Image (tube, rainbow, N blue to C red):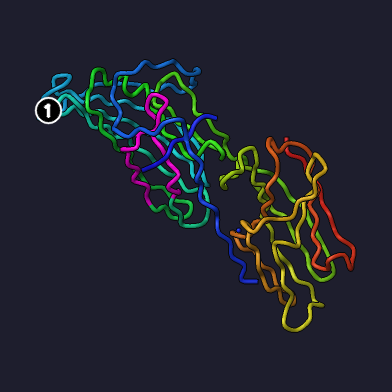
Amino acid sequence: MRSSIFPAGSGRKFSTVGAAVLIGTSALFMTACNDKDTKAGPTSSAPASAQRTVGQGQPGANNGQSTVRTIGKTGWYEGFDITVDKATVVPDEFGGAKVLIDITYKNTTPDNKTISNNTYLQVDKEVDGGASFDSPAVPGKGSATGKVTTSVKTLHDAEHLLDTMTVIYGQASDNQTKIPLQASAQVEGVAPKTLNVTGKLVQDQTTIEITGGTIAPSYTSDERGKMDLSLHIKIIGGPGISAGGLNVFYDYFTVKTPDGQSLPADIRGPINELLNTNETIDNAKNYVVFVVPSPATGTYVVSYDAKKGEDTTPAFSFTIS
């Protein structure tokens, strides 16, 4: 059973520590009942809409009518754009109901991925321990659909029930994304930003070209308030590289942050390339990743040093606004 939340990476390999932080003050041991008061959230610029359709052979509450609410809200987590498309409440013959929440996952990375099992449905400020997430495998740069399902024992008002529900990704000690089903409530989360960054770092026979980047919240456990600064690099070898080639590793890179910290590149950008004479390596997955403090605005200075202080260390600066 899930625990509750609120409130609040040579041949080099790494493992991400799984989140184990409790998510709230009390887990929902039984499926949620629609009998609690709901407070209105902040105003949303893209409100959800509701429409009621007749269910097929569904006697019981609300005369067997199913309630369908279009949500159309998007949040962001682990490289996915996550859109909650709609929610459906289907009454049953015993006075309860089943809730289905349709979600589209758009993978913005080049890797095939499945979103982590760090997902929760909040109902009336508590985690619904009976909720089930069907999270699909999504190809790189592709999309797939999934569902959240849960049941309630007693259904008084389907619209009110939907107003109490929020789809949550991440725990309180992490950077979370919260997508409420209530029309007037806004998504809580930070959208990734594409950086128009270009630069060049030259040391001896190696040229590193920075060809772009992104800044996004870190979704590693216990890194609330930190962000991943990711810079895509192209690696170019000169004519004087010796036989056998030259290794280029992620940990040859360092960044100086706006507040003066000097931070090494992180293994979550596991660059490990063998560069040969007059060779260009332009791999879409080669990102140097730095874990920097939020909000990550200001001037950064990136340096590259394969010589470990034995030669001039090239540097290049850019600003995030």
Please tell me in which quadrant of the rendered image residue 218 appears.
Answer: top right
Q: Quadrant of residue 85?
A: top left
47 on left or right of 15: left
Magenta includes 128?
Answer: yes
Q: Quadrant of the C terminus?
A: top right
| Residue span colored magenta | 115-136
Quadrant in the picture for residue 295: top right
Q: Amino acid at mark 1?
A: Glu
Q: Secondary structure at mark 1?
A: loop
Nearer to me, 160 or 186: 160
Identify the residue at horizontal 80%, vertical 76% (top origin): 239
**What is the number of callouts on the image?**
1
Can residue 230 be seen here? The reply is yes
Rendering coords of residue 226 (x, y %): 65, 41
Q: Is residue 295 left or right of residue 59?
A: right
Is 10 left, or right, of 207 in this rendering? Answer: left
Residue labelled with disc 1: 93
**Measured along the vertical axis of the image, is residue 22 above or below residue 220?**
above
